[in-house]
Amino acid sequence: MQMKINIQTSHPSAFISSTFADLQAERLAVANMLRENGLNVNALDIKPASTNSSKQEIIAGIKESDFIILIIGDRFGSILKSMTGNLNSSITQWEYKIAKSMKRPVVAFFKQFDEAHPIGHDDINASDYKKKRQIFEHFKKTVADAHNPAYFKDSAELASKVRAALIPTYRNVARAVLGQGESYEKRIAELEAEVSLLKSQQVNRRDSGNILGGLGVK
């Protein structure tokens, strides 16, 4: 997996994008795993989006993140025009579009279909069910073609796969950053030693001049 990473920090930030009601356990498991490994998770990241005020917070959260973890189950999710600006995009799909427009790396994970999950699917009796499924299938194909998603069965497997995909990359970045810091510190110490030596030589020359002047030597 090739990712652009922020070398200015050893504590990168993640934004978790998914539907909420059916994937709460997965979101929490991923958030906990990231934090345990020294990565930051944006504050709004494990909460559902529902109001206009949260819209700006989500946009800010995506903007401030180094990468997006996109988790897709079998629900298209809520269509909320006040959030997305149209009636053909779910909140998750809208978050994905924002991330792409901001050129944020996206790592995608698809949950394997579980027919027994009580809230894992869109309501088949809803009037907009067919419309949602058509848009949803197109969305999943777009993500699959662009990001080669990994598949998982439960929250534990998802957290493990996210960890395997991301943590080694960022640990290498952290080591590189720390290595750069050590190099800078070494160079600073060398420069400080040179300055100290120059000051010492200047003092010695001044003292020598004072002694020779006192002896009448010019």
Image (cartoon, rainbow, N blue to C red):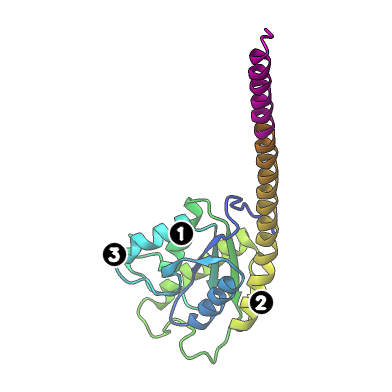
> Is residue 209 one of those drawn in magenta?
yes
**Which label's residue is closer to the chain start, 3 or 1?**
3
Using the image as rendered, state which of residue 99 and residue 15 is in the foreground. 15
- Three-letter code, disc 2: Ser
Instruction: Report the disc number at residue 52.
Output: 3
- In percent of width and height, residue 6 lies at 58, 52
> Is residue 166 one of those drawn in magenta?
no
Instruction: Report the disc number at residue 76.
Output: none
Question: What residue does disc 1 label?
Answer: 62
* Figure quadrant of the C terminus: top right
- Three-letter code, disc 3: Asn
The correct choice, above or below, for 181 with respect to 118 in the image is above
**Which label's residue is closer to the chain start, 2 or 3?**
3
Magenta extent? 196-218
The correct choice, above or below, for 111 with respect to 207 in the image is below
- In percent of width and height, residue 114 lies at 57, 86
Secondary element under disc 1, as helix, strand or loop, is: helix
Report the residue at 63% width, 18% height from top. 210
